[in-house]
Image (cartoon, grey):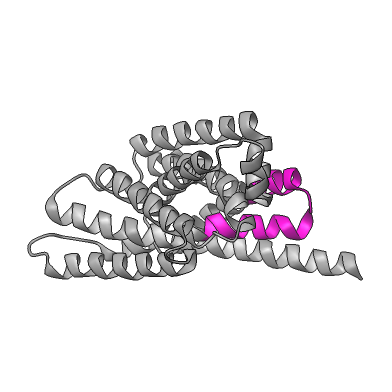
């Protein structure tokens, strides 16, 4: 098992994957508890479209996609806040439109070699040292955010109206989480793909909720579960020569089933 990490591409995949898993778990706790977890799915489809267009036009996909996905997250957030369109409907519109635009861009491209599977399901070979640096910076930012604004995040997660009444700038924190979620999706998409990255946001929190019922406990357990499931999935994908993204998701699914069974046994 240790021999696999002698390869530079596996080292990059491990570092980026761990950072993204931690960030996705921290962001996912708030999103899942506020019933906004599907925003990750909508943003991943937007990232797919942006990556496809950037490749066709000859731009750097990562830096082209980041601002577009962040703007899309603010757009969905604004629609939900103004209640012109329900959050789930806005995400559905964003997902379908983005996927259609990306697919159309790829189909109309001529003379451009595009590996559609790497966009949809990810590729560990696509991860660069630049991604490593960005993921480490992102992880540091979100950990500091939780350390210095833990009580504000707690209040916003469980009672946004109360948070507003005590002077917490909920719109600012919503925007920060939307931006962080966008960056997590864009970085993680290169590793897991647009169809699977949202699972890192949802599964660890759902598993942690089966094992603990306090906010702090769920946050810590989500991070641990997400990191361990990613490492297990990465190792299994190397050993069995399976797609990394799919194997990581299956690892998360197995953990969720185990947590569910443990919860049922406790109640007996």
Tally the numbered discs.
0
Which residue is outermost to the left?
111
Question: Could you tell me which residue is drawn at 40 percent across and 57 percent down?
Answer: 43
Q: Main secondary structure of the magenta part?
A: helix
* Span colored in magenta: 199-225
Front residue of this view, candidates 108 and 158: 158
Front residue of this view, candidates 199 and 88: 88
* x and y, in percent, of residue 109 in the image: 11, 64
**Magenta region includes residue 12:** no
Question: Could you tell me which residue is drawn at 27 percent across and 42 percent down?
Answer: 63
* x and y, in percent, of residue 137 in the image: 45, 31
Question: Could you tell me which residue is drawn at 67 percent across and 61 percent down?
Answer: 255
Which residue is outermost to the front?
165
Does any portion of residue 185 appear in the rendered image? yes
Front residue of this view, candidates 152 and 187: 152
Q: Position of 171 compared to 227: left or right? A: left
Front residue of this view, candidates 94 and 20: 94
Does any portion of residue 236 appear in the rendered image? no
Residue 118 higher or lower than 178, as above or below: below
* x and y, in percent, of residue 111 in the image: 7, 62
Q: Position of 125 compared to 3: left or right? A: left
**Magenta region includes residue 211:** yes
* x and y, in percent, of residue 219 in the image: 68, 45
Q: Quadrant of residue 149?
A: top right
Q: Position of 2 compared to 49: left or right? A: right
Quarter holding the C terminus is bottom right
């Amino acid at each position: 098992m240790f021999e696999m990490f002698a390869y530079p591409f596996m080292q990059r995949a491990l570092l980026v994957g761990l950072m993204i898993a931690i960030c996705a778990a921290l962001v996912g706790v708030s999103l899942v508890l506020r019933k906004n977890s599907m925003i990750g799915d909508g943003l991943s489809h937007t990232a797919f479209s942006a990556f496809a267009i950037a490749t066709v036009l000859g731009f750097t996909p990562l830096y082209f996609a980041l601002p577009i996905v962040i703007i899309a997250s603010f757009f969905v957030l604004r629609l939900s806040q103004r209640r012109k369109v329900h959050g789930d409907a806005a995400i559905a519109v964003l997902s379908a439109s983005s996927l259609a635009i990306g697919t159309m861009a790829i189909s109309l491209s001529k003379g451009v070699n595009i590996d559609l599977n790497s966009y949809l399901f990810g590729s560990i070979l696509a991860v660069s040292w630049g991604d490593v640096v960005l993921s480490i910076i992102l992880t540091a930012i979100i950990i500091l955010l939780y350390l210095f604004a833990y009580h504000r995040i707690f209040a916003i997660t469980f009672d946004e109206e109360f948070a507003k009444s005590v002077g917490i700038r909920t719109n600012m924190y919503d925007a920060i989480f939307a931006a962080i979620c966008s960056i997590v999706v864009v970085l993680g998409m290169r590793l897991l793909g647009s169809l699977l990255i949202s699972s890192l946001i949802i599964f660890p929190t759902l598993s942690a909720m089966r094992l603990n019922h306090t906010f702090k406990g769920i946050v810590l357990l989500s991070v641990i579960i997400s990191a361990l499931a990613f490492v297990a999935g990465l190792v299994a994908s190397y050993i069995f020569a399976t797609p990394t993204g799919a194997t990581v998701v299956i690892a998360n699914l197995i953990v969720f089933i185990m947590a569910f069974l443990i919860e049922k046994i406790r109640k007996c």
